Amino acid sequence: MTKYLLKRLLHGLFSVVMVVAIVMLLIYSLMNRDLIFAKDPQYTKKQGNQLTTYKYERWEVYGYLDYVPYGDYLLQLKNDGEIDEETRSKAASIAAKEEKDSDVAKEYVAKFKNEYESKGYTIVRLGYDSRTKQKQTMFAYKDTPVWERLGKYFLNLFEVDNIHYVENTTGEALENTGITFTLFDPLYNTDGENKVFSPAIMGNGTQHKYLLYFDGEFPYIHQNLLNINLGVSYSVNKGIDIYHTLTDRQDPNRNVTVTFPTGLTEESPRDLHTATYVKGTRDSTQINEARFTDDYTNVNYYKENFSKTGFSFVIGIISVVLAYLLGVPLGILMARKKDKLVDKIGTVYVIFIIAVPSLAYIFLFRELGGMMGLPKSFLLEQATWTMYILPIISLALPSVANLMKWVRRYMIDQQNSDYVKFARSGGLSESEIFKKHILKNAIIPIIHGIPGSVLGALVGAIITESIYLVPGAGYLLTNAINQYDNGVIVGLTLFYALLSILSLILGDILMSLVDPRISFTEKAR
Amino acid sequence: MENHELIDLSDLNMSDAELFAPYDNSAVNAEKITAPRYSYWKSVFRVFFRKKINIVILLLLALVIAFTYIYPLFSNYDVNENIRDSAAKHLSPDGAIEHFGFQLKWILGTGALGQSTFDAMWNGARISVSLAFICAAINMTIGVIAGAVWGFSKKVDIIMTEVNNIVGNVPYILVIAVMVMVFTGSFWTLVFAMTVTGWIGIAYFIRTQVVIIRDREYNLASRCLGTSTFRIAIKNILPFMTSVIVTLLATELPSYISYEVFMSYIGIGISEMSLGRLIQGAVPSIGVPGWGFEFWSPTAVAGIITVVLYVVGQNLGDASDPRTHM
C-alpha cells in the first residue's frame, strides 16, 4: 500500500510541476509584461529615464530578467580592486551623447559593452532627457527564459535557515554564529528570578532569531527553520512573500505587554519571536536602539484577525460540516420518498442550484439575509460573529444541493441491485434494508469527496468571498488577477494544485479504510 | 366485440370482384415481416411531448430565444440614447413610464445613463447566450470526438489521462483569466479561453462512457462479425450515448453563461455589454432604493435562461433514452 501511495504521490507531484509550468508559460511568456505596472502607484509617478530604469529594476525583482546598471558594474570593479575610486567616478560620469564621453568613460563603457554583449545581454543607453531634465544612464539586461524561472522556482521553494545566512546576504559574518538550545526562552524569563520552563531553539547568524519556539497561539509550537518560498507579491501585498500573505494574521494590531531584550517593557504589538535580521537597523533609529540588543529587529506584529487562509478555512470548514449534516440526510430522505412531494421539492432545489448562475443566487441569499438584519459584507474594523453567517450559508447551500443530488442518485442505483432484491425477498423490512445495506454502499463514493471539501476550504471560495468581501484566499486570487499580480497567481496555482492532488490521494485512502473491498495492495488486486 | 350482428354479404349489392381481390402470394412478400415503423427521433419527441410541462417550458424557451435574438433587431438599443436627459437617469419602472410614456422598453426602468434596462438586458442576453452556444458547440464536438478516440485507443488513453490529470488541476478560472489578460477581453478571446481546456473534461466523461459500453456483448459480437471500429463507434455506441450527450449538453450550456457572468463580475470578462457586464456595472445600485431593477433584471434573466435551457436539456436527455420509448 505504501508503495502504491508513494507512486501516486510522485505522479501527483509531477502533475503539480507541469501545472505550474503551464501557468508560468502562459503568464511569463504570453502576457505583456508592462501590465504588471497597471496598478502600481509608484509607476504612475515616474517619468522619462527614471520610469525606464524603474521598470527594469522591478522586472529584475520579479524574475523577468537580469538587470545590470553601468554604475553597479563599476562599483563591482572597484570592490574587486581593479580600479580606484578616482577612475570609478570618472568612468561613471558618462556624457549626454556617446561621442562626447571622456576617454576614461569611453574605455570603461566599451569594456562594459564587450563583457555583457558577449554574455548575450542587451545594452541600453538612455541619453539626457531634456523634458524631465533627468541624467543619462546606461544598463545591460538579459531576459530569463521561462524554463530557467521554473527551475529556480522549485529549487528555491524550500529554504532552510542556516547560520551562514547573514554572511551570505550582507557579506559580513556575525560574531558567535551558531545555534543554541535553551530550556528557558529569554522572552519569558525577563526578570531572571522565577524561571519559566519554555524550550526554544535560537540562532545567531541565521535569518530568524527563533528557529523553534512555543507560544500561546495555535498551534502553540512554531518553527522558522524550514520556510516555504512562493515568491514575492507584485501589487496585492507589494513586496511581501506570498506564503506570508496567505498565512500571516491580518489587521488591526493587537497590543500585548512585551519586554524587549534591553529590559524595556511596554504595550506593543511586536511579536519578538518572529524577529529576522536586517543589517544595521538597531543603530538606525532611536526606537530600535532603546529596545533591541542586536540587528534582529524586523518583527511581525500581533494581529487581531485570522490570516487569509484562516478566514477561508473557518468559513469553509463550518459550511462543509453544515453541508454534510444537511445534505446527506436530505438525500436519503429524497431517495426513500422517491417521486413523492419531498423528492420533487428537493429536485427543484437541486435544479435551481445547478442551473442558476452562482453569482445570482449568492446575491439573492445576501439580499434575503440583509433583510433579516444580517451584515452583508465583511468589515474587519467592526468584526462581529454575525458577519460569518451569510458567507457560510451561501457556501453551504450549493454543496447541500450537490450532496442531495449524489446521495439520492447512489441510493436509487443501489435500490435496483440484486442484493437488495434478495434482502427484500428474505423478508427484511424496508428501513432495515436502507440502514444496513443500501446506505453503507451508497455512502462510499460520498466519503471519497470529504478530504477534497475539507482541503478545498483552505483554498477558499472565489465567488462567495469576492461577493462578501471576505479577506480570504479566494478573494486574494480575484484581486491578484485584477491587479496583474503574477507572483501571487503562480503561488496560488501551486497551492491549489498541491491541495487537489493531496485530497484525491486522501480520498482514496479514506475509501479503502471504509470499504474493505477496496485495497491498494498488489496481492488483493 | 360489441356488435354481434353478422353482415350478410348479399345485402351489400356488390359483385365478387368488388368484394374480393386476389392476394399475390409471391416469395418476396412472404419474406416480409410487418412491425410498427420505429423512428428514433419521432419516438424521442413523442415521449418528450407526453409530459405537458415540457410544452410549457419549450414555449418559455421559444419566448426567451425570441427576445434574445429577434427583439434586439427591432429595439435598436443605444446606451447613449438619453445621455443628455438628466431626468432620465436611474428611473424606477413607474418613473420611466411616467417620463417616456408607456412602451415595452421602459417597463424595467432606466440605468445610469438613462438607457432602457429592458433593452440592455436582452442585448446582453444575446451576447451571453451566443457565447454559451458557440462554446458548447465547439467543446461538445471536440469533446465527443476526442472522447471516442480516447476510449478506443489504449495509446491515446495513456497520454490523454496524463494530460487530463495535469490540465484538470489548473483552475478553470485561472485559464480564462490568463487568456483574457494575454489577448484582451473580446468575445472571441473568451470563446477561445473557455474552449482551450474546456473540451478535456467532456472528452474524459465521454471516454468513461465509451469504455463502459465498448466491451458489452453486442459490441463483442459486432467485432467478431468483422465490423470496423469506426462503424462500431458510429453505429453501435453513438446512438447509445445520445441521451448522455444531450444530458451533458444540458449542464454545459448554463455553465458557460454562469462562467461568463462570474468572470465579468470580478472584472476579467469581455468588453461587450454582456449579461455579466451589466450585472457587474449594476452592483453599486443594489443597495439604493428604487435602483434595484438595474441589478436584478439581468440577474433574473440570466437565471431564467439557464434554468429553461437546463430543464429542456434534461428532459430531452431523458426522452432520448430509448428505454423510455416503451
Image (tube, rainbow, N blue to C red):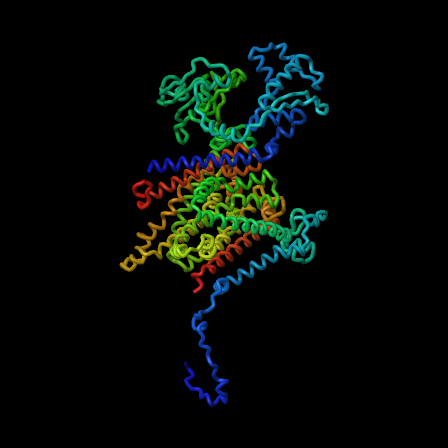
- The reply, left or right, for residue A287 in relation to residue A521 is right
Q: Which corner quadrant holds the N terminus of chain B?
A: bottom left
Horizontal arrangement in the rendering, residue B104 relative to residue A443 (left or right): right
Residue A268 is at least partly visible in this image? no
Q: Which residue extends farthest front? A: B27
Query: Horizontal and vertical percent for residue B69?
Result: 62, 55
Quarter placement of the C terminus of chain B? bottom left
Choose top left, top right, bottom left or bottom right for residue A63.
top right
- B131 vs A75: above or below: below
How many circles with numbers are drawn on the protein?
0
Q: Position of residue A65 (x, y in %)?
A: 57, 27
Q: Position of residue B325 (x, y in %)?
A: 45, 63
Q: Nearer the viewer, residue B265 or A376?
A: B265
Residue B137 position, x and y percent, is 55, 51
Q: Residue furthest left?
A: A426
Q: Is residue A460 left or right of residue B268?
A: left
* Residue A139 appears in the rendering: yes
**What residue is drawn where x is 41% and y is 30%?**
A217
Classify residue A111 as left or right of residue A153.
right
